[in-house]
Image (cartoon, helix red, strand yellow):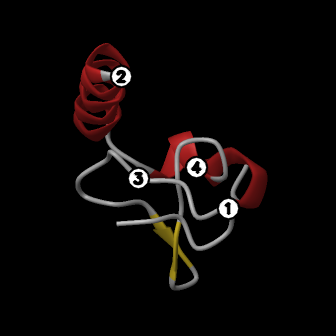
């Protein structure tokens, strides 16, 4: 899946979607600054692990 704003690969599952747009971890806070208030702590942890795994594989 690719970010609809910057075309970057999105390593997160489930993919963050705001107003129908799939967003990468860099674009998500730009479009929805208060996104963290809208997701569960478990989902935030899951996404953090996925981001770390994606960085380790680079």
Instruction: Measure the C-alpha gap from mark 4 to mark 2.
Output: 26 Å
How many C-alpha atoms fall within 10 Å of the one at disc 4: few (<14), some, or many (≥20)? Answer: few
- 20 shown above or below 16: below
* Disc 4: which residue: 35
| Residue 34 in view (yes/no) | no
| Image location of residue 24, percent across then percent down | 52, 52
| Image location of residue 6, percent across then percent down | 67, 61
Which quadrant is home to the N terminus? Answer: bottom left
Q: Which residue is rendered at x = 27% and y = 40% of the image?
A: 43
Instruction: Measure the C-alpha gap from mark 3 to mark 4.
Output: 16 Å
2 or 3: mark nearer the eye: 2
* Disc 3: which residue: 10
SS category of the residue bearing label 2: loop
* Disc 2: which residue: 58
* Disc 1: which residue: 6
- In the image, is 12 to the left or to the right of 42? right
Q: Residue 16 shows which numbered tag? A: none
Q: Which residue is rendered at x = 36% and y = 22% of the image?
A: 58
Instruction: Measure the C-alpha gap from mark 2 to mark 3.
Output: 14 Å
SS category of the residue bearing label 4: helix
Who comes first in sequence, dot 3 or dot 4?
3
């Amino acid at each position: 899946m690719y970010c609809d704003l910057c075309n970057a690969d999105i390593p997160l599952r489930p993919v963050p979607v705001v107003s129908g747009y799939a967003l990468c971890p860099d674009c998500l806070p730009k479009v929805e600054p208060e996104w963290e208030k809208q997701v569960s702590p478990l989902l935030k942890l899951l996404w953090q692990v996925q981001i770390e795994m994606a960085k380790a594989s680079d």
